[in-house]
Amino acid sequence: MTARPSSSLRPATGALMSVEEAGVLLRSHGRYMVAGEEALLRRLPRGRWIGGSIPYFMGQDGGRTTREQVFVAALPGAALESTLRWYDAKSLPNVCVDGPANGYSLIIIPAFSAVHSQFAREAPQYEDMYLKPLLGWIAGIHLDDLGKAAPVVVNGETGEFDGERALVMHLPLPEDQLARLDIVNLFEQGDGDRIRFTEAGFHAHDCLVNGKPVNFADYLKRNAVDTRWPLVADYSGAMVNVSFKGIDEADHRVDFYAPVFDDIEYRFARPMDHYEQALVGALPADSGQVGWSCNCILNYLYSGLEGKRTGPITGPMTFGEVAYQLLNQTMVVLSIDRG
């Protein structure tokens, strides 16, 4: 007897299902994004899909951590021909140039890779950036596996896995449809200390706080800083978060989910009450038009979304989000407007 996906992708933005159910779906007509543990992704059949590793999800029944199911989303634009393409450090600046004239490009980047850092730093200057919709997410691993496993992305057409290159599916849309990206960011800069780092990267030892040199790990501990709230940089009015991954007290080092830069001024985010309610309240009002979404693992953890819903929107909980540029502690939503 042939297995059928019990979830049948009823939520517009995808659903959790077994590997067997996903296999049936991925053999059908369409274009798909898949997220799950690497071992599960390796069991899936080849097809027109793009995938990445992560075990955290907003599923059809609420927030869930699972090593036994994969998340599958049917991508808008399946009626037209799509292309899957790998990008390394040399070719990554062409990611938007290669995008369709009308449509969108979905990118998955392995966390903590060289292309992750490069994209964070240089994406705003890429040719055609902000002219063609680019969205996606940063592949990750179970937090218990940090330091023991590495994130991967996978080309479903070829079965090729990679932990050092980004993978993009370019999807054109019919002329009567238009891709729109929304960013749900709950954070803004607070009024506290001004922070500049002495070197760029996913880690920091020393920094300048209000112009005075300090060790950043010692500063966080001494001031009992709540690292649920990210650092926020003001890019000409656009608030861009850098979230905390952890503090190595022995090495006096702070680790981040996105790189900090030595020519940007940061402040701590303004704290908020009722994190969960603020997140749900900030969702797009016209969620019926949503075609795809992802959310940050830290929103999942800090707002207590395990077993809870974010309206009708489902998707992977990621190590970073992409809406044109790299984001942290946000939700990214793709909607399809019809003319």
Image: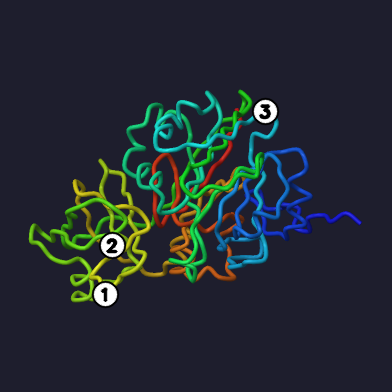
Quadrant (top left/top right/bottom left/bottom right) for the C terminus:
top right
> Residue 262: horizontal and vertical position, in percent?
20, 49
Regarding residue 25, the answer to whether it shows in the image is yes
**Relative side of 201 to 23, left or right:** left
What amino acid type should be assigned to the residue bearing mark 3? Leu
Quadrant (top left/top right/bottom left/bottom right) for the N terminus:
bottom right
Up-down relation of residue 303 to residue 317 (above or below): below
Q: CA distance from mark 2 to mark 1?
A: 25 Å
Q: Could you say whether the residue bearing mark 2 is in a helix, strand or loop?
A: loop
Q: Could you say whether the residue bearing mark 1 is in a helix, strand or loop?
A: loop
Identify residue for label 1: 249
What amino acid type should be assigned to the residue bearing mark 2? Arg
Q: Could you say whether the residue bearing mark 3 is in a helix, strand or loop?
A: loop
Near mark 2 (Cα within 10 A), the count class, few <14, some 14-19 or many ≥20, is some
Up-down relation of residue 93 to residue 188 (above or below): above
Task: Please report the residue visible at 25 percent of the width from the left and 71 percent of the height from the top.
Answer: 251
What amino acid type should be assigned to the residue bearing mark 1? Glu
Task: Please report the residue visible at 66 percent of the width from the left and 65 percent of the height from the top.
Answer: 61
In this rendering, the label closer to the viewer, 3 or 2: 3
Identify residue for label 2: 270
The one of 236 and 242 positioned closer to us in this rendering: 242
Q: CA distance from mark 3 to mark 2?
A: 44 Å
In this rendering, the label closer to the viewer, 3 or 1: 1
The one of 243 and 282 positioned closer to us in this rendering: 243
> Residue 259: horizontal and vertical position, in percent?
31, 52
* Mark 3 vs 1: CB contact within 8 A: no
Identify residue for label 3: 80
Q: CA distance from mark 3 to mark 1?
A: 52 Å
The answer to which quarter of the image holds residue 275 is bottom left
